[in-house]
Image (cartoon, helix red, strand yellow):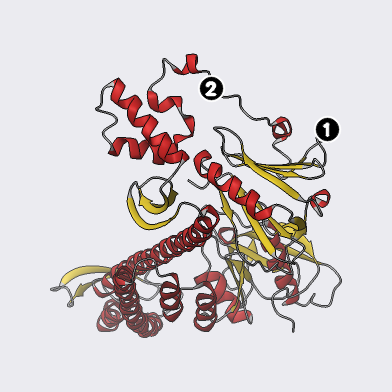
Amino acid sequence: MPANYYFLRQLAPALTRRLAGYRVATCFTQDKDELVIGLTNEAAEEFWLKFTLAAAGTLLALPETFHRARQNSVDLLPGLLGQEVTLVKAWPQDRVLHFCFRSGASLVFKLYSTRPNAIFRPWPTALPELFHQRYLPDADLQPVPPPDPAAAAGLAPSKAYPGLGDLGLAYLRAQGYEAAPRQRQEQLVRQTVAELEQPAAFYITRLGGRTRLSLLPVGEVEETLPADDPIGALRRFTPLLLNRQTYETELRQVRQQLEKRADEAATAAQHVRRRLHTLENTAGYRQTADLIMAHLTQIAPGAAEVEVVDFYQNNQPRLIRLKPPETPQRTAQNLYRKAKNQQRETQELAARADRRETEAFRALEQLEELAALPPGELRTLRQWRKQHGLDAATAARAAAAELPFKVFEDSGFTILVGRNAQNNDLLTQRYAHKDDLWLHAKDVTGSHVVIRQRPGQPVPAPVLERAAQLAAWYSRRKNDSLCPVTYTPKKFVRKPRGAKPGQVAVERENVLLVVPANPFERE
């Protein structure tokens, strides 16, 4: 409702009374859809306007103080500086707020549609300056003429007043508008418009799961604010709305993070259990070796296979393949060695399955804890999130502590860097997914670097470049002025048979030329 005509109709005269004689002291942006204007008067009193002009929605905030950021802040509309406010008005039946200045300059805020904008004219006949310059038709924006009563006669009563908005229509429905006869509908619409033009109060309400500022008592009313103070109502509403939007966004992120963690851990545990079951229920290396040793006298020299009686399987016949260059005793010895490794693998798989199942159960328990947190309390949510290592910074530190690689975070992407030749093999062969991006300094020894893929999100060019800098930095080309770096999806990287630790063969490679550097740490 703050961008509704009827609220702007109340806000505009209040801003006129408050800002008459104020001059614009600063105008800047800290975000592509944000415009901040600071005004002051002769008594050095400040007044701040913060407009969010985004396609997803508009928002006007009137913070009592504002601290400009030192970075990512750009001055705008230099001709607006020093302009003295004389009048603020709302265009009839429109969501437009118009600031008039003593010099004849004007600043118009279009607060409707998916293309909101701000239009500044230094003088009436000057070419306008647009906040969103791509919306060129806004240069000719003019007030819409009042609706023709004759044209509106054939419309439904609610459509004769386009400024009612969804809250006005919800209020009419609550009054029984839809089932009422035409005459009663017209009466209800007139009564509603009268309440909107002279509201008894402002209401902070919940309707359809959204927090709204309304001029009508509709939905679940949470607060009732004085009707003679629209500025105060906006100052109460906007921080509350932003807090709730932030809370809902972060709550959704944590819930999705935990659901993903539980699902991944449970799926991984199932795969490990399946592998473990296969190992435990098939003839192992030790059984095969025992059978070879028990039937040595039946094995002819240089035989490629032998059929034996398998006393492990109810004396069923079993065909065992041999390696003719090896003696049966040598083959059995190798199988006993593999059996020992297989036993260790079985133990590791069982421990891994237990660990992943524990992770899944823990994530499910945290989901229950999350659901039991007091609703709407952002600070409590953030404390709980940090306590359980679910915020971005804690998660990155935990990953760095758990993974045996150098770990860097860049724009939501995780970059892993191998520490030595054996560690490179571990990273590339066991930790990297086939769709992760793999990097290495070209034609020299160095660390393997992996950018973990995020589903549906290609790696941005700046992230790729910084990862390539890391690959160059952790290589023998560290001191070169420029270094070519190979990059390709990990699925095109393979380890040839007999290759030394860290050696791989790369197919379908691309090459990026970068300056060797560590953009994340100064070493």
Q: Where does residue 87 sit, x and y in percent of width and height?
A: 69, 44
Tag 1: residue type? Thr
Locate the C terminus by quadrant: bottom right
Residue 386 lies, with reference to residue 96, above or below; the image says: below
Left or right, 520 with respect to 455, comes to: right
At x 27%, y 83%, the residue is 290
Q: Where does residue 442 sit, x and y in percent of width and height?
A: 75, 66
Tag 2: residue type? Pro
At x 50%, y 71%, the residue is 430
Q: Which mark is residue 125?
A: 1
Q: Nearer the viewer, residue 446 or 81?
A: 81
- Viewer can see residue 452: yes
Q: Where does residue 336 sit, x and y in percent of width and height?
A: 35, 84
Q: Quadrant of residue 332?
A: bottom left
Q: Nearer the viewer, residue 113 or 351?
A: 113
Characterize the local packing of mark 2: few (<14), some (14-19) or many (20 or more) Cα atoms within 10 angstroms: few
Secondary structure beneath dot 2 equals loop
Characterize the local packing of mark 1: few (<14), some (14-19) or many (20 or more) Cα atoms within 10 angstroms: few
Which residue is situated farthest in the left direction here?
Answer: 314
Q: Quadrant of residue 469?
A: bottom right
Residue 176 lies, with reference to residue 203, above or below; the image says: above
Residue 521 lies, with reference to residue 492, above or below; the image says: below
Secondary structure beneath dot 1 equals loop
Which residue has dot 2 on it? 147
Mark 2–mark 1 Cα distance, whole angstroms, equals 27 Å
